[in-house]
Image (cartoon, rainbow, N blue to C red):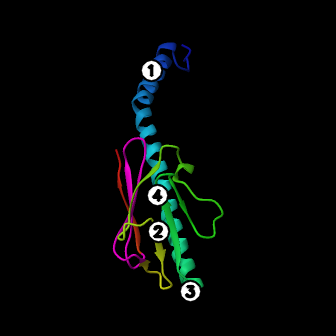
Amino acid sequence: MRSQKGFTLLECVIVITLIVIVAAIAAPQFQKMAVNGNLKAAARDIMGDFSYIRQRAMSENTSLSIGFDTSHNRYTVPGVANPKTPTSFSSDINITVVNFTDHGTNLRFETRGTISPPGPNTITLTNGRGSTATITVLIAGRIYVQYDLK
């Protein structure tokens, strides 16, 4: 008796059907993960710019400010020629709220790494899914982010 090796056509069809079903279930989750990943990347980029300006202010012994413009969805970093936008990660990411203690649009890092105006100052980014990233800068210059992912 000869032993046959391989798969039958029926076995291949069943496996391919299972793969298609699993992919159909998983695809929306991958899309959600990618969209929220872009929001996280934009928030980390802004946090990196805050850290960069804080370090420059301390090393150059001067005050440096980052200015936000929510109407044009951009912010200005000293020493960078063009204003930056969070849309470099995805077109649906917007700076929705700039909540600085003095109700202004500039956040100034002083020579000791502290911020002016004092107090917790926040910037909120929102993506097309309604997820938000709230970046908070404390008076001592500590920066952290809180996510509300949808």
- Disc 4 from disc 2: Cα separation: 17 Å
Give the magenta part as a residue range.
Answer: 116-141
Residue to which mark 4 is pinned: 43
| Label 2 element class | strand
Magenta stretch contains residue 117: yes
Mark 2 neighbour density, 10 Å: few (under 14) some (14–19) many (20 or more): some
Q: Amino acid at mark 3?
A: Asn
- Image quadrant holding the C terminus, namely top left
> Where is residue 1 drawn, in percent x and y?
54, 13
Mark 1 neighbour density, 10 Å: few (under 14) some (14–19) many (20 or more): few
Discs 4/2, front: 2
Residue to which mark 1 is pinned: 17
Among numbered discs 3 and 1, the one appearing first in the sequence: 1
Among numbered discs 3 and 4, the one appearing first in the sequence: 4
Residue to which mark 2 is pinned: 106
| Label 3 element class | loop
> Where is residue 73 drawn, in percent x and y?
50, 52
Among numbered discs 2 and 1, the one appearing first in the sequence: 1
